[in-house]
Image (spheres, helix red, strand yellow):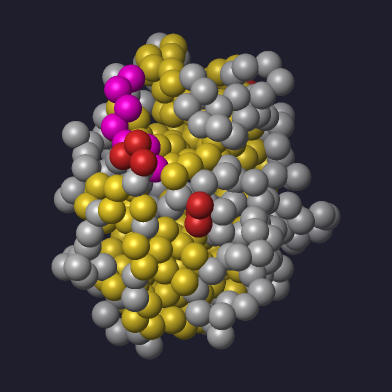
């Protein structure tokens, strides 16, 4: 069972980010990387057309319990803060993700703006001055039309493979670096996407994409053109929207949304193997399987709740963190970080 090791909150310096831009309901504009020693972590925040980096100290970690075993965050020291100036977007950034690079000291950061402009940058975790732009890809329609939420995810096998979802366009573009591979067209507005893990496919590639669109979970196979690449549609509750999807290394797929219920599907039979009903006070906007114990999943509500739940239905931990409403309130200079035993948990939304 996972146990919390520390819960911290850090104030974003007003001199760095004084007027953050508003985020989407399922906003994905925050990413985190912990150094190998665990003494500090780097938080990347997207606001407006820029990405900001904050280095936070994680030394002297403590746990403070409140009522009903709820965890109370403690203040953390901000070591340094800066602007990542290798992301020249012209419109508001909607999503930022971090992936491990080819070497131990290299990170790959992907950002996408409201018109689908994708920028992938190499970041050196040791030398702060070495930030290199890898490549930039314009959307297939050259950004014509109305801007909307856009999401991005890297393949867990090859970081060069990346998928970009655009809500209002109802489209998903898949790239191999700066080469456009194909476009997928959804029936509803996509709200979240994730590549399935390699253990399910077993062919050395990650060619299966899970997408949350409307009230449906759709599965897309990049290797086929039949039915536009859509191989499966799983309908959720009628009238409820799915805002989050997450894939476990075992192949299980978790979805959650406006029905405040987390459902985990077995992709071999496409049946629900676990369901946690009314687990959040409000809509569920973020899900992530634990990197330490894949039988545990983290759940984020739209207000200030974070919970962890075992896939066998046993609750592991419940957290109330008011600062996770990063871009929804005027007091928007707090970030919460929860570190668990032998690993870390990354906040899902601003």
From the viewer's side, name the closer residue of 223 and 164: 164
State whether residue 300 is above or below residue 90. above
Q: Is residue 195 visible?
A: no
Residue at the spot x=47%, y=27% of the render?
279
Counting from the top left corner in percent of width and height, residue 277 is at 49, 19
Residue 314: within the magenta? Answer: yes
State the residue lying farthest toward the front.
Answer: 67
Counting from the top left corner in percent of width and height, residue 107 is at 34, 67
The count of marks equals: 0
Q: Is residue 190 visible?
A: yes
Residue at the spot x=52%, y=23% of the render?
278
Counting from the top left corner in percent of width and height, residue 75 is at 36, 68
Residue at the spot x=74%, y=45% of the render?
169
Please tell me in which quadrant of the rendered image residue 40 appears: bottom left
Quick one: quadrant of the C terminus? bottom right
Residue 232: within the magenta? Answer: no
State the residue lying farthest toward the right.
Answer: 145
State whether residue 50 is above or below residue 159. below
Main SS, magenta residues: strand
**In the image: residue 314, left or right of residue 121:** left
From the viewer's side, name the closer residue of 234 and 338: 338
From the viewer's side, name the closer residue of 93 and 22: 22
State whether residue 245 is above or below residue 350. above
Counting from the top left corner in percent of width and height, residue 122 is at 40, 72
Region in magenta: 313-319
**In the image: residue 317, left or right of residue 343:** right
Residue at the spot x=50%, y=52% of the render?
322
Please tell me in which quadrant of the rendered image residue 234 appears: top right
State whether residue 134 is above or below residue 168. below
Quick one: quadrant of the N terminus? top left
**In the image: residue 290, left or right of residue 302:** left
């Amino acid at each position: 069972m996972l146990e919390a090791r520390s819960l911290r909150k850090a104030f974003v310096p007003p001199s760095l980010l004084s007027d953050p831009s508003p985020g989407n309901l399922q906003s994905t504009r925050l990413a985190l990387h912990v150094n190998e020693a665990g003494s500090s972590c780097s938080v990347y925040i997207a606001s407006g057309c820029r990405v900001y980096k904050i280095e936070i100290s994680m030394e002297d970690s403590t746990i403070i319990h409140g009522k009903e075993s709820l965890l109370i965050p403690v203040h953390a020291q901000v070591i340094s803060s800066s602007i990542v100036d290798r992301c020249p977007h012209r419109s508001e950034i909607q999503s930022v993700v971090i992936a491990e690079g080819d070497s131990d000291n290299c990170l790959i950061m992907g950002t996408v703006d409201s018109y689908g402009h994708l920028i992938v940058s190499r970041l050196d975790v040791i030398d702060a001055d070495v930030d290199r732009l890898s490549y930039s890809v314009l959307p297939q329609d050259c950004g014509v039309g109305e801007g909307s939420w856009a999401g991005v995810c890297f393949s867990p096998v090859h970081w060069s493979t990346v998928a970009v979802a655009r809500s209002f366009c109802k489209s998903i573009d898949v790239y191999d670096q700066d080469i456009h591979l194909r476009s997928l067209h959804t029936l509803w507005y996509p709200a979240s996407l994730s590549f399935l893990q390699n253990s399910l496919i077993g062919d050395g590639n990650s060619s299966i994409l899970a997408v949350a669109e409307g009230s449906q979970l759709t599965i897309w196979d990049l290797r086929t053109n039949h039915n536009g690449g859509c191989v499966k549609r799983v309908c959720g509750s009628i009238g409820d929207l799915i805002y989050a999807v997450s894939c476990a290394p075992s192949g299980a797929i978790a979805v959650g949304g406006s029905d405040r219920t987390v459902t985990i599907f077995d992709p071999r039979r496409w049946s629900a193997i676990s369901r946690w009903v009314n687990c959040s006070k409000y809509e569920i906007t973020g899900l992530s399987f634990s990197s330490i114990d894949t039988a545990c999943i983290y759940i984020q509500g739209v207000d200030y709740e974070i919970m962890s739940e075992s896939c066998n239905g046993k609750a592991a931990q419940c957290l109330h963190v008011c600062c996770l409403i990063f871009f929804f309130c005027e007091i928007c200079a707090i970030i919460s970080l929860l570190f668990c035993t032998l690993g870390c948990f990354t906040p899902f939304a601003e």
